[in-house]
């Protein structure tokens, strides 16, 4: 079957009910997407399917045949971070980093969908992504900063 | 220089944000097998037989049992009582018995269903009460892993002169660390016979020590490497030694790399939890609410093996009397054995349990003596010159008062106490509102003489091509070690932050700077890094060289390395002469310094669902010096959020001694919506022996939410609950009981 992953056409010939997360990590080598619970509770495995955030640990690859998949690897690279990643650097949105790819993908959909910078609304949007390090506040600050069109910039 | 005190960006941040940081499950090892663990299904008893189903393709599998261990069947830690694999005797549910490895992960798990273990089960000991009554002897003759006694003054005299005597009992249960990255470890044997493990961990040298004993190999034949680690919180302090041993044995027997990565449903029930505790207080006060005597009794549940329980109890004991001056104190404590999985390290390490008790007890005292709890705290809190329960005179860096006063003012605590009392009298309102306060201290570094025994080493190196690298086994687990070390080294050496790198913790390249625990990384190891950088600076000064430009670093490399590829400046911990501690009497300077925090919780309770919604948390925390304010604030907010979970949501359900809700579906940790906005103020009362004045910060914020939220809930609902978590059903029950009494 064919999928479009991070703008590239990919084909997959394995078991059709293999979980999307395993196809991404094992078959396509995209290990940026993380598995935290395997039951759709923690959101660490969040990727975008046609722009919508989904838990890639819960969906069989056959259900996304022909669709557009975006993972954290699509955002930026260490030499050139995306504005959202810049905002996370600036406001301390990543600590241990394991929830970060999922957070970034949920936030990417939020920003692309015209989501607001209001902290309460951002908290609601991120409620499906668990983080145990940050207490969320710096993640909320980071997303709000990105919504306002600010990435990196002046240090506090 | 201006690196310390600046919120420099996280060193390894870009790799984490781009999905490039390699956690252990991301590491690709050619020919790797997947290891799985067969675990006990009983609490206590003897293994009679292990039967492998005939017809199953066992030839595809590598199997390891206790018999295969070349050295000692032991997870070396403080005591030598915990086996790496159960050999006949089983002491708790989920105890590892047998290991299997297969190239296919699913097939490895499948095989576990085709093994039958026959047991002769014994009646287990599941509660602290049964353990103390020695229903069965699990550890020595009395089931006590460790006990402590602190005595100050004469408590009998204290109670004789008391105007008020107030007693209370407080109870807390297990808590799961719930790092989002499950435990995992890979292992292989190098062609020269070096047993190498790489994985998710806090303490590379704990694992190193354990593997030396398991394999009976010399130290240089064991190598431990940290991979990117997705959170620890204590949960990756001691248990990784077990997993590393398992993976290494499988790899050694298979002659292939082996990876063991737990899934959530295995990690939660099988690995360590916060110790449950029962704390009893009896307090004597004079007519003004001044403390005259504190008599405190602590019991903790250690689980089936000693692991770290003795030191968890030590910290719990040393924090049990709170940050208050009292002339007569007795703290008696013990940690006991039960047939449950061993409890272990979790952020705060015994202190959140005992501080919950003493702080909530302040509220009970306030009710009894009719002096509000804020005034009580003001009258008794530590100031410079105060003497602690162990007789330590606090000569500097005591920010308890500043933390309290800032928090009270900023939160509007006094005004809200009045406002909410009035709100709660209005029966038409759909909620009750409450506000609660807590004040805590937290000692940084190992307890008492612990740092002397550790004798940690850390360093700074320069390579021949001019790279400056911090050398320490202290791990980056999200808290910001890499960034903080770089800032300290940069300022001590007098170079920009960006010039300093941090070597990955790998026992082949870094000295043993001790475990990444006990809020010690900044204060203790950061202090060593600073000294190492100063040693390098001094060596350069002797040559007349000051590092101003990148070409100076090239010159320095040539000067210092000579013909060698690297020059290392390694320093070792030295106990300040004025810090004196006696392990036998538990008297003296328990910690070099304490950090302080106050917190006000502002919440409301839905009168229909009894759900608690926290509207605001306000806190001020004295950490000496924030080396990196943004990272320090991240520690405070994150630790407070874990405390919110401990207070309101996190309930480990145990049935027959085993956790039965070991999934995120039904073990609930706070989401972004459960976690309120926090107002954080960092107070800086510098500590003269900490690097740039810094004390510890990692554990401190975990201590405050439990008692403050419990006080606020009790205030709001007009009840007296002395147990966490404050689940809606517990609040409802307390309301029904209170109304029944009226």
Image: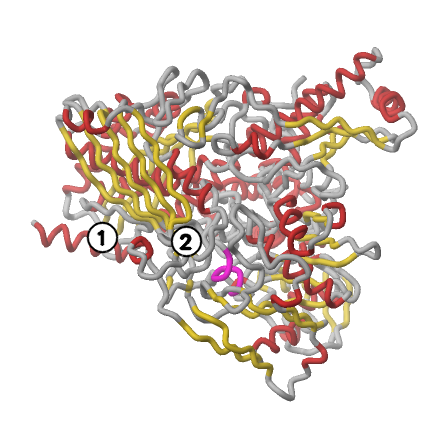
Residue in view at x 71 percent, y 19 percent: B534
On the question of residue A99 being in view, the answer is: yes
Q: Residue furthest right?
A: B563
Point out which mark residue B607 bears. Answer: 1
Residue in view at x 40 percent, y 32 percent: B619
Judge by depth and name the residue closer to the eye, B128 or A135.
B128
Quadrant including the N terminus of chain A: bottom right
Point out which mark residue B98 bears. Answer: none
Q: Chain of mark 1?
A: B
In screen coordinates, is B252 left or right of B145?
Answer: right
**Residue B112 in the image: x percent, y percent?**
58, 75
**Residue B599 in the image: x percent, y percent?**
36, 33
User: CB atoms at circles 1 and 2 under 8 Å apart?
Assistant: no
Q: Quadrant of residue B50?
A: bottom right
Judge by depth and name the residue closer to the eye, B643 or B634.
B643
Over which residues does the magenta segment extend? B265-271
Residue B270 within the magenta-colored segment of the rendering: yes
Residue at mark 1 to residue at mark 2: CA–CA distance: 50 Å
From what the image shows, is residue B610 above or below residue B47? above
Disc 2: which residue: B140
Which color mode does the image show?
secondary structure
Element marked by disc 1: loop
Quadrant including the C terminus of chain A: top right
């Amino acid at each position: 079957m064919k999928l479009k992953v991070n703008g590239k056409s990919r084909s997959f010939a394995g078991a059709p009910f293999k979980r999307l997360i395993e196809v991404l990590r094992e078959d396509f080598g995209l290990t940026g997407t993380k598995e935290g619970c395997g039951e759709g509770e923690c959101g660490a495995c969040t990727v975008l399917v046609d722009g919508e955030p989904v838990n890639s640990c819960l969906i069989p690859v056959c259900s996304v045949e022909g669709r557009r998949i975006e993972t954290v690897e699509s955002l930026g690279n260490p030499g050139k971070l995306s504005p959202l990643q810049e905002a996370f650097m600036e406001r301390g949105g990543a600590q241990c980093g394991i929830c970060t790819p999922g957070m970034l993908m949920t936030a990417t959909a939020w920003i692309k969908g015209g989501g607001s910078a209001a902290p309460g609304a951002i908290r609601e949007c991120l409620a499906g992504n668990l983080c145990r390090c940050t207490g969320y506040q710096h993640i909320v600050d980071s997303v709000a900063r990105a919504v306002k069109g600010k990435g990196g910039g002046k240090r506090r | 220089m201006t690196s310390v005190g600046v919120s420099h960006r996280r060193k390894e941040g870009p790799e984490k944000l781009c999905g490039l940081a390699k956690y252990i499950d991301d590491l690709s090892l050619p020919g790797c097998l997947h290891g799985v663990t067969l675990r006990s299904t009983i609490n206590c008893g003897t293994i009679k037989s292990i039967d492998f189903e005939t017809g199953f393709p066992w030839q595809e599998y590598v199997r390891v049992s206790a018999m295969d261990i070349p050295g000692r069947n032991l997870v070396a830690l403080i005591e030598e009582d915990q086996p790496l694999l159960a050999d006949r005797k089983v002491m708790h549910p989920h105890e590892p018995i047998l290991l299997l490895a297969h190239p296919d992960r699913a097939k490895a798990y499948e095989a576990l269903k085709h093994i039958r273990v026959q047991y002769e089960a014994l009646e287990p000991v599941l509660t602290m009460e049964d353990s103390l009554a020695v229903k069965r002897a699990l550890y020595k003759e009395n089931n006590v892993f460790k006990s402590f006694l602190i005595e100050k003054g004469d408590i009998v005299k204290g109670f004789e002169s008391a105007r008020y005597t107030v007693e209370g009992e407080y109870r807390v249960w297990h808590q799961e660390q719930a790092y989002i990255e499950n435990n995992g470890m890979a292992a292989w044997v190098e062609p020269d016979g070096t047993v190498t493990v790489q994985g998710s961990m806090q303490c590379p040298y704990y694992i190193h020590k354990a593997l030396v004993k398991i394999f009976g190999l010399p130290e240089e034949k064991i190598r431990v490497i940290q991979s990117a680690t997705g959170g620890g919180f204590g949960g990756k302090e001691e248990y990784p030694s077990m997993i590393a041993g398992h993976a290494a044995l499988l790899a050694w027997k298979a002659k292939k790399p082996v990876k063991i990565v737990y899934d959530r449903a295995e990690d939660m029930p099988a690995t360590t939890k916060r110790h449950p505790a029962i704390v009893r207080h009896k307090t004597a006060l004079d007519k003004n609410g001044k403390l005259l005597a504190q008599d405190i009794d602590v019991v903790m549940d250690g689980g089936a093996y000693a692991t770290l329980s003795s030191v968890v109890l030590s910290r719990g004991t040393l924090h049990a009397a709170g940050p208050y001056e009292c002339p007569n104190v007795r703290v008696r404590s013990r940690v006991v054995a039960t047939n449950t999985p061993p409890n272990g390290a979790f952020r705060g390490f015994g202190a959140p349990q005992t501080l919950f008790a003493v702080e909530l007890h302040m509220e009970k005292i306030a009710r009894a003596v009719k002096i509000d709890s804020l005034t009580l705290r003001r009258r008794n809190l530590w100031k410079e010159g105060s003497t602690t329960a162990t007789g330590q005179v606090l000569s500097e860096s005591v920010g308890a008062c500043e933390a309290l006063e800032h928090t009270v003012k900023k939160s509007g605590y006094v005004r809200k106490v009045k406002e909410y009392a009035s709100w709660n009298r209005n029966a038409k309102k759909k909620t009750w509102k409450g506000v609660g306060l807590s004040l805590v201290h937290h000692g940084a570094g190992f307890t008492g003489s612990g740092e002397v025994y550790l004798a940690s080493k850390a360093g700074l190196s320069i390579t021949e091509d001019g790279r400056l690298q911090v050398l320490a086994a202290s791990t980056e687990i999200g808290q910001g070690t890499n960034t903080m070390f770089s800032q300290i080294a940069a300022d001590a050496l007098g170079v920009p932050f960006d010039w300093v790198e941090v070597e990955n913790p790998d026992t082949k390249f870094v000295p043993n700077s001790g475990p990444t625990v006990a809020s010690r990384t900044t204060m203790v190891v950061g202090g060593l890094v600073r000294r190492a950088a100063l040693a390098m600076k001094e060596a350069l000064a002797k040559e007349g060289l000051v590092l101003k430009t990148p070409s100076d670093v090239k010159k320095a490399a040539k000067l210092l390395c000579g013909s060698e590829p690297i020059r290392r400046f390694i320093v070792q911990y030295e106990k300040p002469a004025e810090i004196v501690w006696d392990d036998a009497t538990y008297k003296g300077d328990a910690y070099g310094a304490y950090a302080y925090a106050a917190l006000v919780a502002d919440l409301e309770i839905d009168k229909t669902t009894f759900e608690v919604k926290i509207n605001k948390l306000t806190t001020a925390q004295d950490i000496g010096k924030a080396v990196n304010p943004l990272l320090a604030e991240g520690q405070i907010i994150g630790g407070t959020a874990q405390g919110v979970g401990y207070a309101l949501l996190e309930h480990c359900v145990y049935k027959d001694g085993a956790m039965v809700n070991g999934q995120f579906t039904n073990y609930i940790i706070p989401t972004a919506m459960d976690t309120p906005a926090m107002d954080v103020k960092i107070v800086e009362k510098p500590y003269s022996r900490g690097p740039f004045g810094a004390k510890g910060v990692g554990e401190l914020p975990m201590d405050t939410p439990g008692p403050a939220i419990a006080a606020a809930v009790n205030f709001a609902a007009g009840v007296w609950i002395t147990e966490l978590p404050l689940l809606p059903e517990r609040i409802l029950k307390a309301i029904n009981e209170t109304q029944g009494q009226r």
